[in-house]
Image (cartoon, grey):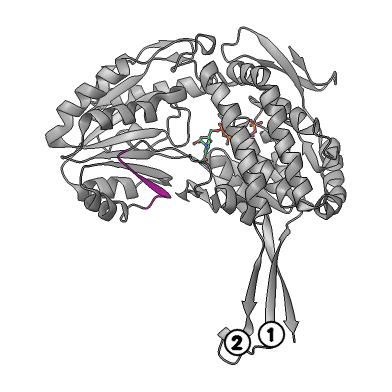
Amino acid sequence: MISITAFTNEKEVYSVTGEEQIGTIRLMDQEEVENVINEAKEAQPYWYSIDLYKRAEFLHEWADQLLENQEKIAATISKEVGKGITSANKEVVRTVDLIRYIAEEGCRMHGELMKGDSFKGGSTSKIAMIDQEPLGVILAISPFNYPVNLAASKIAPALISGNAVVFKPASQGTLSGLLMIEALLETGIPPEIVQTVTGKGSEIGDFLVTHPKIDMITFTGSSATGQAISLKSKMIPLVLELGGKDPAIVLKDADLDLAAKQIVSGAFSYSGQRCTAIKRVFVHDEVADDLVKVIKENIDQLSIGLPEEDATITPLIDTKAANFVEELIDDAIRKGATPIVGNKREGNLLHPTLLDNVTSDMRIAWEEPFGPVLPILRLNSEEEMIEYTNDSEYGLQASIFTKDVQKAILLGSKLNVGSVQLNAKTERGPDHFPFIGTKKSGLGAQGVRRSIESMTRDKVFVLNL
Ligand code: NAP
C-alpha cells in the first residue's frame, strides 16, 4: 500500500473494484496550496537560468527512472484506474518515449530571426531576434484515464522550456501521478520546480485556476470542467483537451473487415474510457447489415473481466460513470434501438454493448458515454454523415472508411473536427502529432512542439544597426 503522508486531512483510495484500499492521499487546504504556488513562482527564474541541455538531461534521467520503476507504476495504474496490466505498462513506456522526444525537441527550438527589409518601409538596418521565454508557473490538471501519460505530456514541455509546474492529478489517479513525480524527484531536480497539489478538484479547483501566480493552465478532462475553468481564469493562456463524440464514417465501398476491426478496437479499448474512442458509427444503409455482423463478431472476441486478468473490458471508474452509461443505453432501447450484444451489468462492469438502429432523438447519438457502448446510425448519404458529425457539440476526431482516398479527403475537409483518420480508428498518437479539439472538445493544441509553444511567449529583441 502506498502511503503518501500521515496527515489527518486525507482520503482513502480504493482500487476500481472497490475491494482493496491501495493508498491514502492528502486533501490539501488553501494555505498549503498557496505555499506551493509561491515556492514554484520563486524558484522558476533559477530553473530557467539552468542551461537548456541540463534541463534536458533531467528529463532523460526522469525517463530512465520511470523505466526502472515501470512494474510498480504500471501495477498502481492498473489498480487505481482499472486498466489491464498490459495497457498500464504500455502507458509507462509511451510516457518514457514522449519525455525523451520532448527533451530533444526542446533543445532544437532556437527561436527566429526576421529581417526588417521584408516589410514595405522597413530597413536592412533592423533585425528582430525572437526568443521563446517561459510563461512562469504552469498549472497542469490531468484526468483519471491516463494518469501518467497525460500528466507527463504537460509537465515535460513545461520543464524543458524553463517553467515551474503546479500539478493537480485527478483524485482517482493521484497515486499513479505521485509515483511518476517521485521518479522525477529522484533525478535531483530542484523540488520547488515541480509541485503536486492533491485534493478534490471541486474543492481546490477554483482557488488554483484563479490564483494570480498561475501564468498558464493546461487541462485535460471533461468539457464541463474545461468550460468552467475557461470562465474563471483571467487573462492567462489556456490549453484545454476535453470530451469527444468521434464518429466512424463507413462508406459503401469500405473494406468492412478492416473497418469493423478498427471500430471495435477504437470503441472498446479500456472500456471506451478514452477521449478519442469511437463513440458512434455512421454507416451507409446498403452495407449496414454486413458491417453490424462483423462488428458483432469482433466484439464477441473481447475479453471481459478484471484489470488483473488483463481484460479489455473492465469495471468503469466509479458507480456514477456506470449508471450514466446504463442510462444512455436504457434511453436508446426505450426509444427503439436494437441491442445486438451486451446490455448486461455486473456491478460497475458493463459488458460491451452494440446498439443498432439508433436515431437522432436518442441521447446516445449525441452524448459522450465514456464507457463500452457503441451506437450504429444507418444513414443514406455522405451529406447526412457530414451533418451528423458537424451538428455535434464536440469536434475532436473522425474516422472515414473508404477505398477512395480522394473522396475521403474531400469529405474530411468538410468535417469540423481537429483530426481526420483515414481507414483507421480515431486515436491520439503518435504523440508528436498536433492534437486539437474544436467546439466543446478543446482550445489550443497539444503535441510536443505545440505544447512547448503554448507554454512560452515570443520575446523580441530589435537590433538597430
Ligand atoms: P473531469 O472530471 O473533468 O476531471 C479532470 C480533472 O479536473 C481532474 O483532475 C479533476 O480533479 C479536476 N477538476 C474537477 N473539478 C475541477 C474544478 N472545478 N477546477 C479545476 N479542476 C477540476 O474529467 P475526468 O472524468 O477525469 O476525465 C474524463 C473526461 O476527460 C472525458 O470527458 C474525456 O473525454 C476527457 N478527456 C479528454 C482528453 C483529450 O485529450 N481531449 C483526454 C482524456 C480525457 P478531481 O479528480 O479531484 O475531481
Q: Residue tagged by mark 2?
A: 117
Q: Which residues are magenta?
A: 416-423
Image position of 173 with respect to 35: above or below: above
- Residue situated furthest bottom in the rendering: 121
Magenta stretch: residue 185 in it? no
Q: Residue furthest left?
A: 286
Q: How many marks?
A: 2
In the visual, does 140 lie left or right of 428? Answer: right
Ligand 1, seen in the image, is in the quarter at top right
Query: In terms of image quadrants, where is residue 78?
Result: top right
User: Is 387 displayed left or right of 463 in the figure?
Assistant: left
Residue at image point 27% right, 49% down: 386
Disc marking residue 126: 1
Q: Nearer the viewer, residue 317 or 124?
A: 124
The earlier-in-sequence mark between 2 and 1 is 2
Residue 256: x and y in percent read 21, 31
Under tag 1, what secondary structure? strand
Badge 1 density bin: few <14, some 14–19, many ≥20, Cα 10 Å: some
Front residue (pair 101, 175): 101
